[in-house]
Image (cartoon, rainbow, N blue to C red):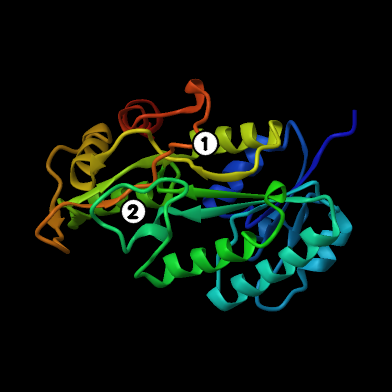
Amino acid sequence: MKKKKILILGASGFIGNALYKELCNYFDTYGTYFSNSALSGNKQFFKYDIQEDDIFKILEIVKPDYIISSIRGDFTSQVQVHVHLMEYLTKSKCKLYFISSANVFDAYSKYPSYENDKTLSESIYGRLKIKIENMMMRIPKHKIGILRVPMVFGNTSPRIKEIKILLESNEPIEVFPNLIINVTNDDRLTQQIHYLINQDKYGVFHLGSTDLVHHQDFIKEVIKRLGNHHPILKKVYTTNEDRYLAALPKENKLPKNLRISYQEIVDHHLMVD
């Protein structure tokens, strides 16, 4: 049986690269990169400048069954790339999974958000994700998957790397005592997306922990796990009341073995170097 072809846009980034490693042994997997010269000799990777290059050239070469968009870069160029992807989807049998964000709900602070809740964002980043999501909503629903992801941790994640650097240099680490979040890590996120591809799922999915935690408490747990018990914490208050930035699953729940709690992320997936 012929392997399904997958194209990961942004495969040299933290999430994109984790996805490539998860999927490459099971599918005919390709990726794009921008500046990582180590990938230049890899025939599965294409150099792609979001502001200069034509995505159609790569699409015509790969002819993917699935595209996973985890691309970063100039916001205007991101929108334009996804306009082109929508055009490609209408003319092919391809399906698009878009890595979106819990920030599409960051204007709502009193409650956690679920798959069918209306999106509204005060941040430029959140509004970018909403714009792309809205474009996707105009495509036949069986061809798209909107994957809303909260803060992503993991031993090689930018967030953990930053915490380690600040700990080593004895610099303050920002925490938000009134912010209630859910979280995920690269291992579980990539397993979940692997499952969605295997099952050919479509729709809107919230791929975070099934429980909530205050940002400050979670970061304290992470630091404790990393072995530093005397961090300098800079408490940042954006409001006097608790506010939520959490995308929880309700309609599209994954199998129990693929769900995760925030404590599992601390206990099992943040390993000391």
What percent of the width, then of the height, locates residue 185? 44, 39
Q: Secondary structure at mark 2?
A: helix
Place residue 121 in its image quadrant: bottom left
Q: Nearer the viewer, residue 273 or 106?
A: 106
Q: Give the position of the N terminus as an image quadrant.
A: top right
Which residue is rendered at x = 87% and y = 61% of the image? 60
For residue 162, which numbered disc appears in the image? Answer: 2
Q: Which residue is mark 1?
A: 252
Query: Considering only vertical position in the picture, is 212 above or below 54?
Result: above
- In the displayed structure, does residue 57 sit left or right of residue 179? right
What percent of the width, then of the height, locates residue 95? 73, 49
Amino acid carrying label 1: it is: Asn
Q: CA distance from mark 2 to mark 1?
A: 33 Å
What percent of the width, then of the height, locates residue 59? 82, 60
Instruction: Using a 10 Å C-alpha cutoff, classify the residue at mark 1 as few (fewer than 14 neighbours), some (14 to 19) or many (20 or more).
Output: some
For residue 142, which numbered disc appears in the image? Answer: none
